[in-house]
Image (cartoon, grey):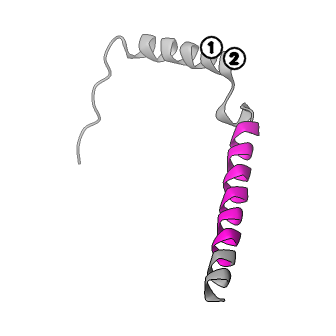
Amino acid sequence: MTTPPSQDPGDDERRARRRELDRQVRDRYGTWRDQPRGLACAVIAAFLVLTTAAFVFAVVAVVMAAR
């Protein structure tokens, strides 16, 4: 069994500063869940549309080549 590390004298002060910084960041930027998702949805939708169009074009090209 190992002994827990001893606490530095400045640990409490550093933790308090970190908590304050975290609070300021949350107040300013929110969390990632609060961010808008519109651009991500547009990118995914464009990818799906282009992939579908490419698949349809490939199928048409194969059918035309078989004739």
How crowded pointer 1 is (Cα within 10 Å; few <14, some 14-19, many 20+) is rated as: few
For the image, the number of numbered tags is: 2
Give x and y (percent) for residue 14.
Answer: 42, 13
Q: Residue at x 75, y 33 (%)?
A: 36
> For the residue labelled by badge 2, is the local secondary structure a helix, a strand or a loop?
helix
Give x and y (percent) for residue 17.
Answer: 49, 11
Residue placed under numbered mark 1 in the picture? 24
- What are the residue bounds of the magenta stretch? 37-59
Residue placed under numbered mark 2 in the picture? 27
- The kind of secondary structure the magenta stretch mainly shows is helix
Q: Residue at x 68, y 45 (%)?
A: 43
**Quarter of image, res 50:** bottom right
Indicate yes or no whether the magenta region holds residue 40.
yes
CA gap, disc 1 and disc 2: 5 Å
Q: Amino acid at mark 2?
A: Asp
- Pick whichever, 37 or 6, lies toward us: 37
Q: Are marks 1 and 2 in contact (CB under 8 Å)?
A: yes
Q: Residue at x 32, y 22 (%)?
A: 7
Q: Amino acid at mark 1?
A: Gln
Give x and y (percent) for residue 47.
Answer: 66, 54
Q: Quadrant of the C terminus?
A: bottom right
- Left or right: residue 7 versus residue 31 is left
Q: Is residue 6 above or below residue 32?
A: above
| Residue at the extreme front | 67
How crowded pointer 2 is (Cα within 10 Å; few <14, some 14-19, many 20+) is rated as: few
Q: Is residue 16 above or below residue 6?
A: above
